[in-house]
Image (tube, grey):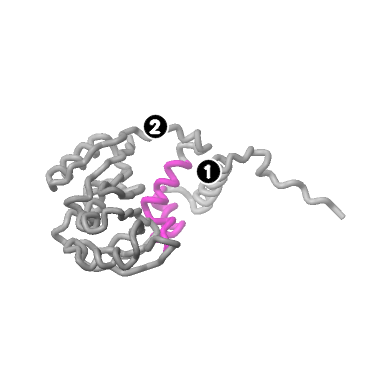
Amino acid sequence: MTSIADIEIPADGTGLGELFETVPSLSCEMERVIASSGHGLWLSGAPQDDVEDALDEASAIGRYSLISSDDDRWLYDLEFDPDTVDVFEVVLEEGGTVLSASASNGNWLISIRVVDRESVSSLYDRLVADDVSPTIVRLYDVAEESHSQCGLTPRQYETLVAAIDHGYFEIPREVSMQELSEELDISHQALSERLRRAYRALVTSELNVAEEETTAPPIPSN
């Protein structure tokens, strides 16, 4: 059964540990939609010059490049030194998926999806072995969080999860709809319809729109 774990990890000893030592006010948030061999991270909480000076001095950062900016934060593509503990890579190697990650006050809070609770235990042991001190803040099985709260059927939920895991929503897409339909063993049309229904369910739920409000009024005849 799929499980979700929210884990807090001190930045000290990870790829960004030195940055938080140099710029204690630094805040960081993972950007999922970026195609590169590194990690897309939004950095904020200090002047850009101070951030880039810290990036230049950090021995754990192999290279970095500015991708975008938004008000007082900057999106960087970072690559860590091979000898550095890359928490994101550790999660992937243990079969997990990073759903979200943010850091402030020298601590990471990472939400991870794994296949079962045993995988969480394995990931925890791996982080401890890498001299990282993880704290499991929350652990729950997906079944405990009812999909119906978002209006999704189990199949719609599973389809959206598969689409995320295979990079369907990445920019650019890492898998076509045809490839995703073959992976799920359903027709292209069935996948398209299931995704549209899932989008509708999510939108009506998140926007708190009643079902009857989403029905367009009839077009008056002349």
Q: Quadrant of the C terminus?
A: bottom right
Give the residue drawn at x 62%, y 40%.
209
Residue 79 relative to residue 202: left or right: left
- What's the mark number on residue 143? 2
For the residues bearing labels 2 and 1, Cβ distance under 8 angstroms: no
Amino acid bearing label 1: Leu
Residue 110 lies, with reference to residue 64, above or below; the image says above
Residue 168 in picture, x, y percent from top left: 42, 56
Give the dominant element type of the magenta stretch: helix, strand or loop.
helix
Circle 1: is it few (<14), some (14-19), or many (20+) Cα within 10 Å? Answer: some
Residue 217, position in %: x, y? 75, 46
Helix, strand or loop under label 1: helix
Q: Which residues are magenta?
A: 156-184
Residue nearest the viewer, comparing 153 with 184? 153
Residue beneath the point at 67% across and 41% down: 213
The quadrant the N terminus occupies is: top left
Residue, disc 1: 202
Q: Give amino acid for label 2.
A: Ala
